[in-house]
Image (cartoon, helix red, strand yellow):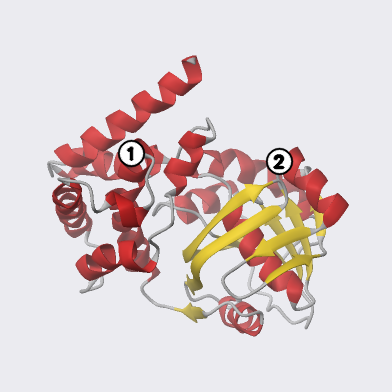
Amino acid sequence: MTAMINPAELRIAVMGAGAVGCYYGGMLARTGHSVTLIGRPSHVSAIQAHGLRMQTLWFDETVDLQASTEVSAVANADVVLFAVKSPDTEATGAAMRPHLAPGALVLCLQNGVDNAERLRIALPDHDVDAAVVYVASEMAGPGHLRHHGRGELLIEPSPKSAPLAQRLVAAGVPTEVSDDVRGALWAKLILNCAYNALSALARLPYGQLVQRPGVTDVMRDVVSECKAVASAEGVRLPPDVDTIVRRIAETMPTQYSSTAQDLMRGKSTEIDHLNGHVMRRGEALGVPTPANRVLWTMVKMAERALANA
């Protein structure tokens, strides 16, 4: 599909209305686009009753939009912001497929580096664009988004990406169309591998985490392994990836990782698609990844302990 996005007001569905989906869906709704959030019953009920509270660094207001628990709510959407957890990619994509309008664009706003590829297999008749998400946010309660920092997007080029980027910029979301989304996705994966598991296991935000003895040394080992795997994959990383990793604790000191948020809520995590992905690709490519393996194993044990509690 190559039809362009033309209407001034877009019909947008957010599939997976957690912290990421609510942030970008809410920002677009604030500027007049028709937005439907699709998520868990507790959030949907609160949003239907009171709207979405967006408590951000720049404003604190309630945004009126639609909300549903049904996958069929993607029907008629011009754009679907796809923000489900990585393990749910294929199943959610398959569930959406019968309801998607011809020509709809699905923008993949997920952690990990291979979700867009997996989603294209589940949605062979639709356009799927990969995006790199840089936002620190959490759901502070049903229908209540709390934003801790940043918010920009990087989108891969396609016939529809430029007009969508224009709408996002107009909605207050800094957005760039880039020829090297793959490298940026890997850079973010490295960032997540360095922080997510450690933040989850220690139950600490980034600023406090890096003050603990030995943490930065472990992070250095994790990053070194990730870079070796990326190199073996033929990925061109940004030259400042080490600086990006180091500075995140300074720019987002109060942020808990998404893995930490999941464990603290008793939910399964995306660790298989973070440190676990690096571990599996390292095995396939003959690159040792012992630090990533240890973090993956510890988070998996923590998940099991919560499940059996």
Q: In the picture shown, does residue 309 fall above or below 242?
A: above
**Residue in the image at 70% along x and 47% along y:** 96
In screen coordinates, is 264 left or right of 212?
Answer: right
**Residue in the image at 49% along x and 65% along y:** 131
Instruction: Give x and y (percent) for residue 21.
Output: 62, 57
In screen coordinates, is 33 left or right of 148?
Answer: right
Q: In the picture shown, does residue 17 fall above or below 308?
A: below
In screen coordinates, is 238 left or right of 117?
Answer: left
Mark 1–mark 2 distance (CA, rounded to whole Å): 27 Å
Whichever of callouts 1 and 2 sits on the residue coming sooner in the sequence is 2
Crowdedness of circle 2 by 10 Å Cα count: few (<14), some, many (20+)? some
Q: In the picture shown, does residue 98 fall above or below 162?
A: above
Disc 1 vs disc 2: which is toward the camera?
A: 1
127 or 49, nearer to the observer: 49
29 or 228, nearer to the observer: 29
Three-letter code for the amino acid on which mark 2 is drawn:
Arg
Decide: marks 1, 2 in contact (CB < 8 A)? no
Quarter of the picture holding the N terminus: bottom right
The residue indicated by pointer 1 is 202
Instruction: Give x and y (percent) for residue 176.
Output: 48, 80
The residue indicated by pointer 2 is 40
Q: Secondary structure at mark 1?
A: helix
Three-letter code for the amino acid on which mark 1 is drawn:
Ala
